[in-house]
Amino acid sequence: MFHISTKRSTFVLVVLATSYLAQSLAVAYSPERRYVPSLKGEFAIFAQHIRGHGVVRGASAVELDRDSPMRAVFQRLPGEFITHLDGYPATSFHELDDHWGDTKVRWIDPKTGRVHTKWIYIPH
């Protein structure tokens, strides 16, 4: 694993090798995390390369409150990668906090590249 740090962001290059092929996974992310009141949890926003999708920008839950509506979506933390809420890209903390009521969540499992969608209710 190579780690290069700058003032604005951190870049991590992880090289995964198997007996049949070697894959490179480059992840660029903002080290900043924020608590999102409407989703009742701490989230990080970053871009990552996901096999079959290329470089994708979105959000990942770092920690969720017990009563977070996102618990209906996430099976593991951190893990699933939110790409859209109600069809809008989940690329800012403001966007994450700007949804309530019935909300359609689209996320990708970075390990499999599989896309999922689910309707959740976010109290206002």
Image (cartoon, grey):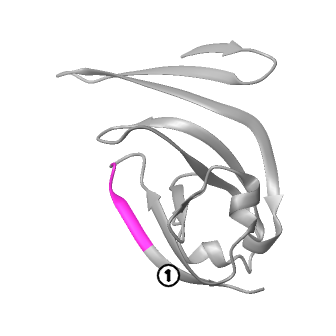
**Residue under numbered circle 1:** 119
Q: Write down the quadrant of residue 18 in the picture.
A: top left
Image coordinates of residue 98 in percent, x first then y, are 73, 69
Image coordinates of residue 91 in percent, x first then y, are 63, 49
The residue lying at 70 percent from left, 51 percent from top is 92
**Circle 1 SS class:** strand
Image coordinates of residue 1 in percent, x first then y, are 54, 16
The residue lying at 54 percent from left, 29 percent from top is 27
Look at the picture and state if 121 lies above or below 74. below
Look at the picture and state if 102 lies above or below 49. below
Start and end of the magenta stretch? Answer: 113-117
Image coordinates of residue 34 in percent, x first then y, are 81, 52
115 in the magenta segment: yes
Tell me the kind of residue under disc 1.
Answer: Trp
Look at the picture and state if 44 lies above or below 3. below
Residues 75 and 89: in front is: 89
Total marks placed? 1
Lateral position of residue 67 relative to residue 77, left or right: right
Residues 19 and 52: in front is: 52
Look at the picture and state if 88 lies above or below 57. below
